[in-house]
Image (cartoon, rainbow, N blue to C red):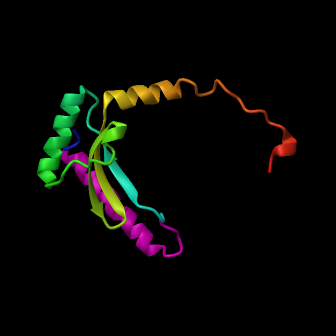
Amino acid sequence: MSTDPTRRAAFITGLRDLADFIEAHPGIPVPRQSTPITYFPKQTTDAEMRAEVDRIAGLCGAQIDPEPLPYGHYMITLPFGPLRYEIAAILSDARARYGDLSSYHGCVTPDSDPAHVA
């Protein structure tokens, strides 16, 4: 859990510094889409991770977001304009599916015919 006062102060300072920087440089772009800032509880059992998300939800007065549940993401989302503060637990089945999918990374190499490169 990241409630260490020094770490929290540094995070808050970083957010303010970023906001000041963006405000001082009106020519630089900002993301067009909603931008998440996500906290992931320590990876333990599904029950323990759900309990941690539930605990934080209680502190924030938030509800569990039902949309990502079928994908194994147990989370709350707090919107702040185009920013979202998320607390997300990636449950064991979702991690296993991702691990299975990732296990093929690098095993297939597409042909690289220079004539077909745009």
The relative height of residue 88 versus residue 13 in the rendered view (above or below) is above
Nearest the eye: 102 or 36: 102
Using residue 106 as the reference point, say whether residue 70 is left or right of it: left
Mostly what secondary structure, the magenta segment? helix
Q: Quadrant of residue 114?
A: top right
Nearest the eye: 79 or 41: 79
Residue at image location 20% in from the left, 36% down from the top: 50
Residue at image location 17% in from the left, 48% down from the top: 57
Residue at image location 37% in from the left, 65% down from the top: 82
The relative height of residue 47 versus residue 115 in the rendered view (above or below) is above
Nearest the eye: 53 or 67: 67
Image coords of residue 87 (percent x, y): 27, 46
Give, as a single range, the part of the protein colored magenta.
4-30
Image coords of residue 90 (percent x, y): 33, 35
Residue placed farthest to the right in the image?
115
Residue at image location 80% in from the left, 51% down from the top: 118
Residue placed farthest to the front in the image?
70
The relative height of residue 66 versus residue 13 in the rendered view (above or below) is above
Q: Is residue 53 magenta?
A: no
Q: Is residue 5 magenta?
A: yes
